[in-house]
Image (cartoon, rainbow, N blue to C red):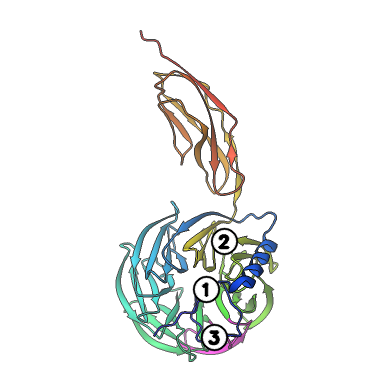
Amino acid sequence: MMQLLSTGSGRYQGPRSSAVRPRGRRAGILGTILAGLMLVGNIPATAAATVTSTIPVGASPRNVAFTPDGSKAYVTNWESSTVSVIDVASGTVASTIRVGAGPLGVAFAPNGLKAYVTSAGPNTVSVIDVASGTVTSTIPAGETPMAVAFAPDGLKAYVTSGGSNSGTVSVINVASGAVTSTIPVGPLPNAVAFAPDGAKAYVTNGQDSNQVSVIDVALGRMTSTIPVGSSPTGVAFTPDGSAAYVANNEGDTVSVIDVASGTVTSTIPVGWAPDSVAIAPDGSTAYVTNSGADTVSVIDVASGAVTSTIPVGTPPTGVAVAPDGSTVYVVNTSSNTVSVITVDAAPLVFTAATPPTKANTRAAYNYTFAATGAPAPTFRVSSGALPAGLNLDGATGVLSGTPTKAGKFTFKVTAANGVSPHAVTDRITITVTKAKVR
């Protein structure tokens, strides 16, 4: 029978000792108090990156990945056995794809045509045609398939099997859609990532092994292991391939590995029970989900310091950075949501908020409200009422139409983008006169 631990990471890690402290979901009053204290203590006074919206998804989401073009994001939903397809432009779930029971990992082929989703229930990988949004085939994989990653050339994919202490990685030939070999690695493999040049792959080995398995991709075998922190779960390479960041779930740290030497060069303290890590496309920033503290640690790669801590949902597990680096998606497993972090978020300031104050009932009226800030704003009438016949487009800020009733109309317009405070106009009064009939 398949087992999934009720932990913040949402990753299968085998039987755990009762002495192990709770992670992610709090245990009793003490856990709640400690988590609350950590959350309050870690909120920064100011931060460029902040949560600007929250997207409801399926039940018990676990991981997230963006399409290579950044137009969509796939979220695996463990309890509902589905994938939520998010339209990034609108920030809404556009469709839902049913997959095998207990989906966990998700990854896109480099050309964006296929997505692989691991399902721990039937021990399979669902192959999704991205254009049609349908499952076209399933591939038998190892016991309790966890994470999946495509090689940079798109020819093969690695799938970790976390169902036993004798860990393995299944190698899938993408063209044939079949497992062609199995690579023994360390016990309880969790995450897997390829180096940008495709020469190596790193696999985190959880709980008691405290190591990363290094696979030589050309040889198709594990060639070494790297000691890291306690219970490593997440791993990501910098875009230049010089370093890898490993989230140590029970160590509350991130180990930074120098790829050339295969050694840990620094250890960065982060929040409680870090789960996953993602690095910005420009290599400047790493984002780490802290499943025990409901936060994301933002690490400056150059200095190796945590520059801010962002409160998100409960508990945060998977994380992905959009290909253009503008947004970060964080999966909140118990909240059944995705937190959208805008990297260069800035409060809005109106740059156009003085529409013509006179109109008449036979003349078309048109004015565009505008505001600077990030992300882009939406507009609404927050008090008073517009002249009858006029409408405000919430997306564009265009106030237009032909007035149908004479009189004085006073209102305010608010621009919002998820960053506080909102921008609000002064009181605006438009006097509509009745057009003379000739």
Label 2 to label 3: alpha-carbon separation: 27 Å
Decide if residue 137 is on the left or right side of residue 105.
left
Q: Nearer the viewer, residue 262 or 253?
A: 253
Label 1 to label 2: alpha-carbon separation: 29 Å
**Is residue 223 one of those drawn in magenta?**
yes
Instruction: Determine the secondary structure under disc 3.
Output: loop
Can you see residue 199?
Answer: no
Image: magenta residue range: 204-231
Q: Is residue 260 above or below residue 322?
A: below
Give the image location of residue 424, x and y in percent.
Answer: 58, 37
Q: Nearer the viewer, mark 2 or mark 3?
A: 3
Give the image location of residue 394, x and y in percent.
Answer: 46, 40
Give the image location of residue 170, x and y in percent.
Answer: 41, 84
Q: Which mark is on residue 435?
A: none
Q: Quadrant of residue 241?
A: bottom right
State which quarter of the image contains the N terminus.
bottom left
Are the residues tagged 1 and 3 within 8 Å (C-beta)? no
Decide if residue 42 is on the left or right side of residue 157.
right
**Is residue 267 one of those drawn in magenta?**
no
Q: Residue at x 58, y 33 (%)?
A: 425
Report which residue position mark 3 lands on. 16
Give the image location of residue 157, x and y in percent.
Answer: 42, 78
Going by the numbered disc 2, the residue's amino acid type is Val
Report which residue position mark 2 lands on. 312
Q: Residue furthest left?
A: 136
